[in-house]
Amino acid sequence: MLDSVRVLDCGNGIPSSYCTKLLADAGADVVKVEPESGDPLRRWTASHQDLGGADGALFRFLHTSKRSVV
């Protein structure tokens, strides 16, 4: 449906990440632009556990089907 659309995701929170997830799910080419330190959502967990450098489940859910650049 949105195969010819490219979207730059420059947001840093759940609302913008979810919005661009919907666009990616509809076929848009979404590119997540992250700061050098990485998106803070990468390390967020509901249980506040240390992920040891792995991406959290919320980040993986919101950024499926996206590419990422720093």
Image (cartoon, rainbow, N blue to C red):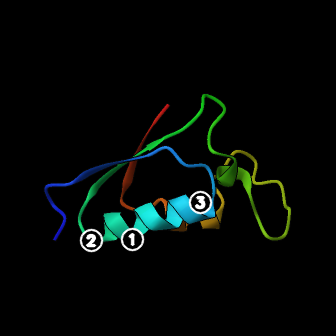
| Mark 3 or 1, closer to the camera | 1
Identity of the residue drawn at 51% across and 67% down: 18
Q: Residue 22 carries which label?
A: 1
Identity of the residue drawn at 52% across and 68% down: 61
Determine which residue is flagged by label 2.
26
Q: How far apart are marks 1 and 2 (CA)?
A: 6 Å
Determine which residue is flagged by label 3.
59
Disc nearer the start of the sequence (3/2): 2
What is the three-letter code of the residue carrying label 1? Leu
| Mark 3 or 2, closer to the camera | 2
The residue at the far right in this view is 48
Q: How far apart are marks 3 and 1 (CA)?
A: 14 Å
- Cβ atoms under marks 1 and 2 closer than 8 Å: yes
Residue 35 percent coordinates (x, y): 59, 33
Image check: 56 left or right of 19? right
Q: Say above or below: 31 vs 4.
A: above
Q: Say above or below: 40 vs 69.
A: below
